[in-house]
Amino acid sequence: MNMMPFTKTALKNLFSKPATRMYPQQARKYPQRTRGHIEINIDTCILCGICSKKCPADAITVDRAGRTWSIERFGCIQCGYCVESCPKKSLSMLQDYTQPAGQKRIDTFEKPPEPPKEPVVSEQKEAEKNA
């Protein structure tokens, strides 16, 4: 009868590296094809709403009148359909996950208003005014 069957495992673990990493100090390196969280480049977005229609979890909301794009981070299932369907490629899937939080969070991005377009006056009309 063996009195200490765990001795071999205990000695092996005493002299080996830890199996875990120091989480806050060492960030995790994700594999290349990891689906993390959605990011948007609001400057290139045209607020067409295709991403919200393609989202199976209804986590994305586009308000054309209010010029806002919002996502419910904990409602998103990271499927990537919105990224594939975006005509302007404004959406991208980052490889890190949403940060943990105590309550649900909705991120809203507001598109800045477009500057007013100045009327184009032809040089010929300008010359007539000056003459």
Image (spheres, grey):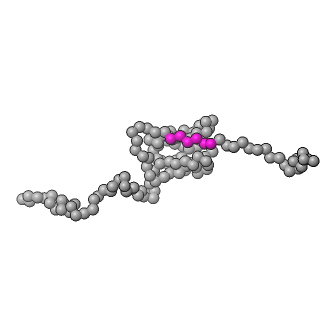
Res 48 seen here: no
The extreme right residue here reads 131
Q: Residue at x 48, y 52 (%)?
A: 94
Residue furthest to the front:
130
Return the x and y of residue 30 as percentages of the image width and height: 42, 56
Q: Is residue 87 above or below residue 1?
A: above
| Residue 35 position within the rendered picture, expressed as x and y whole percent measured from the top left | 46, 52
Q: Position of residue 50 (x, y in %)?
A: 58, 43
Does residue 98 belong to the magenta stretch? no
Magenta segment's dominant SS is: strand
Q: Nearer the viewer, residue 42 or 2?
A: 42
Residue that appears at 57% across and 49% down: 41
Rendered position, 119 above or below 25: above
Decide if residue 59 is on the left or right side of residue 127. Answer: left
Residue lying furthest top? 65
Q: In which quadrant will I find the N terminus?
A: bottom left
| 65 sits to left or right of 107 | right
Q: Report if residue 116 is visible in the image.
A: yes
Give the residue displayed 45% in from the left and 50% down from the top.
Answer: 36
Magenta stretch bounds: 107-112
